[in-house]
Amino acid sequence: MENLVEIRGLRITFAGAVDVVQGLDLDIPAGKTLCLVGESGCGKSVTAKSILQVIDHPGRVSGGSINLRQTDGSVLDIAKTKPTSPLMRQVRGGDIAMIHQEPMSFLSPLYTIGNQISEALMLHRKISEKDARAEGIKMLEEVGMPDPARRYDSYTFQLSGGQRQRAMIAMALINKPRLLIADEPTTALDVTTQANILDLLGELQRETGMGVLFITHDLGVVAEIADEVAVMYLGKIVERAPVRELLENPKHPYTKGLLASMPRLDGDFKAPLKAIPGMVPPPALRPAGCSFHPRCEWARKDMCGHVAVLETDLGANHMVACHAYGPQAHKFSRVSKVVDVGAPVAVAKKAVGKPLLSVRNLHKHFAIRAGFFQRQVGAVRAVNDISLDVFPGETLGLVGESGCGKSTLGQTLVGLHRADSGEVQFADIDVRAAKGAEAKQLRTDIRMVFQDPTGSLNPRMRVRDIIGEVLQVNGNHSAAEIEEKVQGLLARVGLSPDYAERYPHAFSGGQRQRIAIARALASDPKLVIADEAVSALDVSVQTQIINMMKELQAELGLTYVFVSHDLGVIANISDRVAVMYAGRIVELGETDQIFRNPRHPYTEALLAAIPGRGARKTGARIRLTGHVPDAAKPLAGCAFADRCRYVTDACRVNVPELRGEGNHLDACLRSEELKLRSVSQTEALVSA
Amino acid sequence: MGSFILRRIIYVIPALIAVSLISFLVIAVPPGDFVDRLAEEAAKKGDIMPLAEIEAMRRAYGLDQPLLVQYWSWITGVVLRGDFGYSFGWNLPVKEVIWPRLGLTVVLSLASLLFVWVVAIPIGIYSAVRRYSVGDYIFTFLGFLGLAVPNFLLALALMYVAFAWFGQDVGGLFSPEYIEAPWGWGKFTDLMAHLWLPMVVLGTSGTASVIRVIRANLIDELHKPYVTAARAKGKGEFALLMKYPVRHAMNPFVSGQNDIFVDIVSGGTIVAIVMGLQTTGPLLIKALMEQDMYMAASFILMLSVLVVVGTLLSDLLLAWLDPRIRYQQG
Ligand SMILES: Nc1ncnc2c1ncn2[C@@H]1O[C@H](COP(=O)(O)OP(=O)(O)OP(=O)(O)O)[C@@H](O)[C@H]1O
Ligand code: SF4
Ligand code: SF4
Ligand SMILES: [Mg+2]
């Protein structure tokens, strides 16, 4: 056995005899990074957990083998080892360690991270507490934790997201495992922090020579970190190849679909994305034959619907499980439809004419209270002196790291927060002073779509009432009119009209987001503010929603403010982009200008952090350290100064104003002299 | 942590002031006072007290003063001199009556609480880990019984059983020969022999509710991601259970302890009367009926102090157990 782990015919069963994973074969090579990709619900996490026998009750491994090559050359079948046996405990954390998506919930808040790190060491080695502490601190230092000796005694809630993930990595690596399983370790992090953690994992892998099984749904991350890639769909590997081969020459329709639905930053950002239709069915409803067939555009009913698929070896380590490459290949034409362009791609709309929404010097501060009498001791300047215009029919993208004030700005604009000062003018209405009929008009003209469609839809209301609520509240519509409107809206957002009778829990995440959008559109708004509206969705569903929103915009002449931390999505949907940092706009311009000709060092760093930029081959990486400055502390000079690679003394004294020629503005004192890198100058992820 | 403790202690002071004021007023406000009661008693015996004598007696006891003045002189006495006033009913200073009784109340309450923990924690953990096992069902059933049966009924039943089957004299906290005896080894063992019964009676409903709380909390915690993470480190199941889920489940448990303690302290009264215990409960009832105001107010004050201190202790324990509280509110 040459691989570190060889999984054969793995079967994982949950309550009700539902097979979540059914006959999975997977080889994990030693000393390499294997990425496991697939949409949510494909069984990636349970597969990873099965290797350590830590699947949550009532799940269990019900068949197959998981062979681990031991250091002495013998082979241990983990699937046949008792989960509570000493042998299994030795494997866990010793030979194979695991890191997870959400360190906040995978580390206990009741013990210091040091306690949990040295615990891992002491479980596998006889070592005194004092030595374990020294080793723990050394490990924290190796994973790049700032001030490791002090942080060793910190609790999780005292650390930032990136630091927590570093602590978790330290805990996993302290026993020098031969295999590290990383389950979406960067998904919950900001793009800049993600870049740092990916760099760290890459370095550690090269230094220690351990094998890494890296689970992700993000093909950009795959391009960044993988040596080999396995694509998983409904509990089976459907394609496997070395990373370049897979990204440049994907074979399986599912892989092709994933790549095509990913917003890209090479070529034309705004080229329409091609979505995989439908979504991953629950494992209990796994289709017969090739389980991908209901969503596959090549599918042949006579075959794919009932004949089980076998793996085909295409040579050069490339394996695919699809009839179109098997013995019956000649029956398939293997032609994919070109993206349905629909309406001619709107040429980037120019910001001209009279703005629909005009914001001047807007401030929103949150009081910080402390002490005995909860006196105000300071203020978080979440929105700090922001001015911008939004023109009719355009999409303004709003990007920035978490905590930079994107959501607060959006919420202040729709009136969910009261601004402290500044002006907001919508059409002819002064938003901050609006009362009576004007206020009512604002409520129907400006609507919001939220990130979490589950939380924002009232579970006790039928879809009809959720969508029609704004019409009922705001007046003179008869029941019949509302009914007609709701039916029309459901059709518009691609849902069947009979869904009106159902309750929100009966829908998938993507469908709920469609309902939320239909609700926002019910009052025929002029402006829709979408706050991370697609962030919680899988890429294929995300693409479906983005495409739908673009179509609706073209049909109805809507104006969008689109808030997102995902630069790919922003590039794809926006006409203009505002980059926010610490409550301010630091750069504002057309999408092309921002992505191809950034003027602010923060924008440059954000762009450089996008995974899959090919940066790992070049030495000259731009990486941001530290985090967004504490918004509570008053700052002199440029807020970005502490993290800026171009900082000068002047930057710490003078506050840069947002200024510039034409419609490309930036807030950097040195923007004239600097030559910054853009996305087009780095090697981009190659197109499918 | 230091400032946290200090803050908590300072928060307690207004609560104590309010409690003392209210307990005094509640006793003093109803019409009539101890002297009226005396006069009534005397009248029943056909011995009419002259008005002048009544007034003189009032003056002597300070009952002619405005209420707030009475309160002030009483509370300053309590705080500055440990003087709780004079019991009209016992013709003794209140403190001489109250301290021994209070001591026994504390001992009994703590013993009951301990009983609750020792029995309920292991059973709660067992029931959560072996959810839906036969043992779990049996304990759940017993728990329902424990909650449903009133304390005094349980007291009567147990007394009957102890007397009829073991021939033990189970009333009271002491055998008759020790009641007035000074403290010594003999009196102590005698107390222990009597203590278990009221302890079980007082602890039963608390035990049942603690089992439920621990079971529910622990079931929530057993499948938390940090448990999977610790298991994936190679930790053994029992050590894992104790270090992570049980420890996490302890927090809501600790904050619930205060209610149980209050239940025990206040529930003690009826049981004490039924079982003839020399604790505070029966005395309080007597004092209230006689309008023996300093006595009653002192009792209520001391019981409230007990409860407030209990709350303080459980808060401090919680802060000690949970770093989030220590660091985020401290
Ligand atoms: N404890 C459980 N009980 C029942 N079903 C479960 C359980 N855990 C996972 N599943 C189901 O197993 C399937 C695979 O889940 P898994 O978490 O492995 O998916 P995934 O590919 O990792 O998805 P994601 O990208 O969202 O993390 C899903 O349909 C999920 O609902
Ligand atoms: S087997 Fe058929 S349905 Fe499945 S991926 Fe290939 S072509 Fe599509
Ligand atoms: S003003 Fe100075 S510190 Fe701020 S972004 Fe420009 S160069 Fe950097
Ligand atoms: Mg997962």
Image (cartoon, coloured by chain):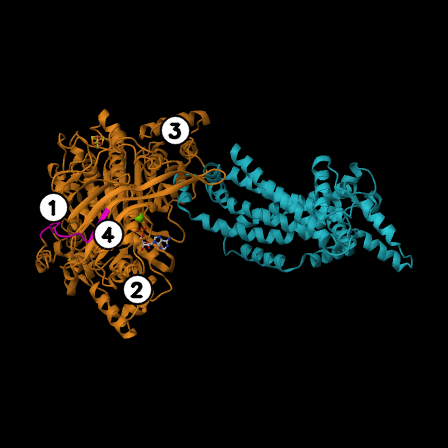
- Chain for mark 3? A
Magenta stretch holds residue A355: yes
Residue A570: % across, % down:
19, 47
Report which residue position mark 2 lands on: A470
Disc 3 to disc 1, how far (Cα)?
Answer: 43 Å
Identify the mark nearer the N-term, 2 or 3: 3
Report which residue position mark 1 lands on: A687
Amino acid type, residue under disc 1 in the picture: Ser
Disc 2 to disc 3, how far (Cα)?
Answer: 57 Å
At a point 90% along the width and 57% down the height, the residue shown is: B48
Say how many tags the image has. Answer: 4
Disc 2 to disc 4, how far (Cα)?
Answer: 23 Å
> Which mark, residue B114?
none
Q: Which type of secondary structure does the marked residue at label 4 adopt?
A: strand
In the rendered structure, the colour chosen for chain B is cyan
Disc 3 to disc 4, how far (Cα)?
Answer: 56 Å
Identify the mark nearer the N-term, 3 or 4: 3
Question: Are tags 2 and 4 found on a single chain?
Answer: yes
Pointers 1 and 4 in contact (CB under 8 A)? no
- Chain for mark 1? A
Please state the extent of the stretch shown in magenta in the rendering.
A347-359
Report which residue position mark 4 lands on: A425
**Which residue is situated farthest in the front direction here?**
B52
Question: Could you say which quadrant of the image residue A360 lies in?
Answer: top left
